[in-house]
Each structure stands twice: as C-alpha cells, then as structure tokens.
Amino acid sequence: MPYILDCEITSHQEVAPGHYRLVAHAPEIAAAAAAGQFCMLEVQEGFYPFLRRPMCFERIYPDSVSILYKIEGEGTRLLSRFTAGQSINIQGPLGKPFPLNGAYQRHIMVAGGIGIAPFPALAEAIIAQLGKTPEVIIAARNEDLLLCEDIFQQMGCKIHLATDDGSVGKKAFASEVLDALEPSKDSIVYCCGPMPMMKATHAVCQQRKIPCLASLEAEMACGDGVCLGCVVEANVEIEAERMVRVCCDGPVFDSTTIHWESY
Ligand SMILES: Cc1cc2nc3c(=O)[nH]c(=O)nc-3n(C[C@H](O)[C@H](O)[C@H](O)COP(=O)(O)OP(=O)(O)OC[C@H]3O[C@@H](n4cnc5c(N)ncnc54)[C@H](O)[C@@H]3O)c2cc1C
Ligand code: FES
C-alpha cells in the first residue's frame, strides 16, 4: 500500500525557466520507492484543484525525495508557490519501477524535455545495483531547458546533448542521437518524454533489435488502478485487455507493449 503523508518541503527552487526542483522530507516513502515509480501530490489544500498531480521521483535519498517538474497548468502553478518549511501531502510510491537487468553492458537513457525527471534516480540505481555507468541523451528545445547535466556529470555518465535550435549539442532529435550511438545487442534503452519522441526511440530500438523501456505519462485521477482515467492502447489481440493503465500496469512499459500507431 502506498503511504499518504504530510511531508516537509526542505528545498524548492526554480532550476530553469518554468522548471522547479522540490525536495521533501519523506523517509517512509523514500525507503519504499524505486527509480521509475511516481507519487501523487496534493497541490492545494481544500477542493481545488480536486485531483492530485502525478510526479515521478527524480532522486531518492535515505530520508527524502526530489521532484523535478515543469509548469503546465493550474496545478503545477499552485505547486510552484509552496515554499521550504511548508508541508505537502504526498501519496506514494505508486506504479512499477524500471526493471534492472545486469545482462546488458550499455544502458542508454533517452530524455526529451521534462522527460529527464526519472533518470537521475535510474542512473543512481544502475550504478549502485548493476555496477555499470549509464549514458544519457538529454534533448530539449534550447540550451536553457537542458536539465540535470550537472547531476549526470557528477555520476560520471557519458552525456550527449541535443537541442531543437542547435544552441548546444547536436541539432537533432533524441532518437537520431540514439541511432548515431549505434546501440547493439549488448544495449538496453530507457526513454521518457513526449509521445512522438518515444515513438521514434521505439522505432530505432526495433530496427536495431534492442529492448526499450518507455516511461509513459497520462492524465490521472485515482493513481491507483480504479478509475481507468489513464489508459493507453496496448498491442493485445483480445479487445477486452487492449487498454493498459499507466498508473499501475506502468508507468514503465516494454515499448513493444504500446500500440504506437495510436499516438
Ligand atoms: C506517472 C507520471 C509521472 C509524471 N512525472 C512528472 C514529472 O516528474 N515532472 C513533470 O513536470 N511532470 C510529470 N508528469 C506530468 C504532470 O503530472 C502534469 O504535467 C501535471 O499533472 C499537469 O498538471 P497541471 O494542473 O499543471 O496542468 P493541467 O491544467 O491539468 O493541464 C495542462 C496541460 O497539460 C496536459 N496534462 C495534464 N496532465 C498531464 C499528464 N499527466 N501527462 C501529459 N499531459 C498532461 C493537459 O492535457 C493540458 O493540456 C507526470 C505524469 C505522470 C502520469
Ligand atoms: S489513474 Fe485511475 S486507473 Fe490509473
């Protein structure tokens, strides 16, 4: 069962235009959480907005968790107004984490925009549990929106940057950068970001016959498998089983599970 706890915010800072990092003291949640899982944040006391907002764990520390988020609408705007010292209600951990498989030599993370959010925790887990140093492709619209480069540098990861405007790194899509790295059968890919970017990353992995784990997003109400508000279409013959729930069947899926043609 996930915890539902009031947690003290220990730090909350804008890290790029419209992007924030919130750290909360949450020892129980941190102890139970794994990379790829997420939590639901109550962004306002009272009834508006009614629904909690899902956010993955950026880092999992012994007694706290960090959340890296982008302002999208009203909920995240309200979230950005919380200050250090205030408490925030967190429900989690939820969902399935990234499975870790030590059989692969190359672990390549492919991130588009705020899709970078689950990867610092994943990189830490790969280093600590598999003894391998992952590579990361960080793609964003421009230089100002490239996130977490310093964190991956400190971990010793090989970093590949890509921007839409060419302001830094390659002027290329994340999937094109991945293809240029020539991943082969000793490689496994993890991706998170906009659906078209994950669809293109899945296509590269299919062509190269390598596994790809995709962390999906969907609008969520319950976060707990009940409301079916978060379903996505899967490649399943039986019609009744075709929709999978991002909140509890995912958010991490083997990319071959997803019916990408629908997106
Ligand atoms: C498992 C999971 C993990 C996530 N982790 C992160 C994270 O670490 N950092 C982060 O910045 N965001 C993350 N998101 C997305 C985040 O939950 C949404 O951006 C947020 O709920 C938007 O709330 P809002 O009230 O600000 O915007 P709203 O006013 O609710 O919506 C603004 C716009 O964003 C769209 N939108 C709303 N919710 C989602 C969603 N869940 N996915 C895609 N589009 C959405 C709406 O359709 C609308 O166009 C995650 C989503 C999921 C499902
Ligand atoms: S959010 Fe309710 S079933 Fe997934």
Image (cartoon, rainbow, N blue to C red):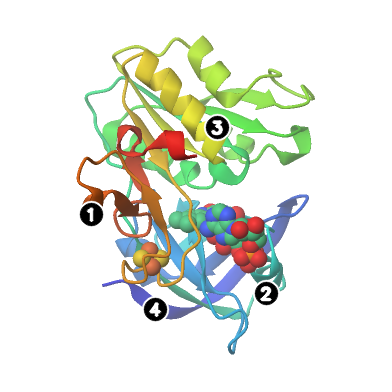
Q: Type of residue at label 1? A: Ala
Looking at the rendered structure, the secondary structure element under dot 2 is: loop
Residue, x 40% and y 14% (percent of image)?
183
Q: Residues within 10 Å of mark 1 (few under 14, many from 20)?
A: few
Q: Amino acid at mark 4?
A: Ile
Above or below 160: residue 196: below
Q: Which dot, 1 or 2, sits closer to the camera? A: 1
Q: Which residue is mark 1?
A: 240
Choose top left, top right, bottom left or bottom right for residue 177: top right
Report the disc number at residue 197. 3
Secondary element at tag 1: helix
Identify residue for label 2: 82
Dot 2 amino acid type = Phe
Q: Earlier in the sequence, mark 4 or mark 3?
A: 4
- Sequence order check, earlier mark of 1 and 2: 2
As drawn, the label of residue 4 is 4
Residue 99: name its quadrant. top left
Between the residue at mark 1 and the residue at mark 3, the CA separation in whole angstroms equals 28 Å
Q: Left or right: 122 with respect to 236?
A: right
The residues tagged by marks 1 and 2 sit, at their Cα atoms, a distance apart of 42 Å
